[in-house]
Amino acid sequence: PGGGAGPPESPPAAPPEEIPEDQRLHLVVYVDNWNIQPFNRNRVFTSIREFLRSRLSPADRVMLMTYDREPHVRRPFTSDPSTIASALFEIERMSANGARQDSERRDALREIRDSRDSTHATVVARMFAESVQNEMSFGLEALKNTVRSLAGLPGRKAILYVSDGLPMVPGEDLFHAVQEKYPSGGGGLLQAHTYDMSRRFQEMISLANTSRVSFYTLDAAGLRVSTAASAEERTANASIFVDSVHWSNIQSPLQMIAEETGGLAILNTNDPTRGLGRIGDDLRNYYSLGYAPAHAGDGRFHEIEVRVRNKAWEVRHRDGYRDKTTEARMSDGVMSALFYDVESNPLGIVIDRGQATARDDGNFVVPVEVRIPIGRLVLVPQGDVHAAKVRVFLGAMDDKAHISEVQEAAVPIEIPAAELERAKQQVYVFTMPVLMRRGQQKLAVGVRDDLAQSVSFAVRSMSVGGR
């Protein structure tokens, strides 16, 4: 009567299933402070914060960047989206360049309106277009460099690009304003094509598709009001047609880079919540289709076509990709490891170093040792030995973000047949001399077993030339 057995204990909850690296999402929230108005930016941040908190899974990694005439990583990749969401409050206090851009555009339109002849008006349009084109060149190169840095990361990669738009043809609307004022002036609209940036956008799209990066774009300006219909801007005397050209011009790249990389564009809404919800669904629900092409690493561009039986279904996918060589993919992996400290190391490699030697120019030669477990390599018999086919790729970055060229070297591993079993318990040490500056350095090493087609990437930080 002293009390029986209690209810059986519930079995412990199973730990969450580990997501393979090649299925993880790496998302970059990229806020273009150079092409956005602070009010527009801060308004959409409310929806972006909710998106980050509710639409991403614990396995996802998110990074926050801003572009302020040069790119800045505000928060590195993290699996805690709330960290990124909170950091957006810091960005709300930052300045942005969009108001200055709008002011300069209104001033140029006003000068065209007050001009005495078509020559002067055309010069105004050209000067404005050249200035914007120059700024665009810096901005697009920064965005391309971000895509390049993501290329070597495993899994799915996406950029949520937030701005008030980017002009496909800088100054196109101003040339239309010149044409409106001087219909018989001639030549103005033809000059606009001189500043066409569509080729530069196509280059970025090609790079993104080759790097397996999708763009999702958000036009933070939302619903726009014509300056011709706004009492406070009537002095600029821009027609509704000129404004419509401007809006189409700055929205078309957002739509193009999203659609042609398999992403989505959020346009013409003051509340992007629904659009961000679609992006969240898009990131969660997808098919990953694989096939073995006849070509292998030929470095050429190949178009992609996807067909479905049900004609009512809508399929979005990349338009194509450039089939990178093995060497290019390994270099991408080394660069991504340098930038983001991302390691993937199934071969179990270890990076070590020897004693640095000072040179007369103030730099140092550092012997970098790469330790490779022999038992994890594929060895094939070749006469009296068993041989592996291994290559090492190495890159370095100093504390000022100066990056060395990625070096490649073949590793000659041959084991006598009689010693094979004992050798499988040992490591092979391969040494590469690397030229480095004094100070903090970060090394990234990639090792490829060409026979097994398996790769590893590892990172190590070190101080060089310390006193």
Image (cartoon, rainbow, N blue to C red):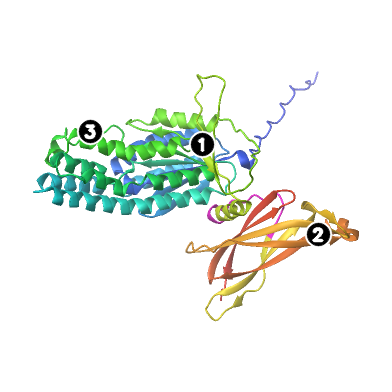
Image depth: mark 1 or mark 2 in front: 1
Secondary structure at badge 1 equals: loop
Question: Of discs 1 and 3, which sits in the foreground?
Answer: 1
Where's residue 258, x and y in %?
A: 43, 37
For the residue marked with disc 1, what is the amino acid? Arg
Residue 394 locus on image (x, y percent): 62, 61
Query: How far is mark 1 from mark 3, CA to CA?
Result: 34 Å
Query: Pointer 2: what residue?
Result: 426
In the rendered image, the quadrant that contains the N terminus is: top right
Determine whether 312 is above or below 457 in the image: above
- Nearer-N-terminus badge (1/2): 1
Q: Position of residue 448 (x, y in %)?
A: 69, 54
Q: Given the image, on which type of amino acid does mark 3 rest? A: Val
Q: Which residue: 64% across, 45% down?
A: 296
The amino acid at mark 2 is Gln
Residue located at (70% from left, 61% from top): 410
Secondary structure of the residue carrying tag 3 is loop
Q: Is residue 295 visible?
A: yes
Does the CB distance between marks 1 and 3 fall below 8 Å? no
Nearest the eye: 214 or 306: 306
Which residue corresponds to the image point at 23% horizontal and 33% vertical from the top-left? Answer: 225
Q: Which residue is mark 3?
A: 225
Residue 42: within the magenta?
no
Q: Which residues are magenta?
A: 338-350
Q: Give the CA distance from mark 3 to mark 2.
A: 71 Å
Identify residue for label 1: 318
Is the C-beta separation of discs 1 and 2 under 8 Å?
A: no
| Residue 222 image offset from top left, x and y in percent | 31, 34
**Which is more N-terminal, label 3 or label 1?**
3
Residue under the image location 33 percent in, 41 percent down: 165
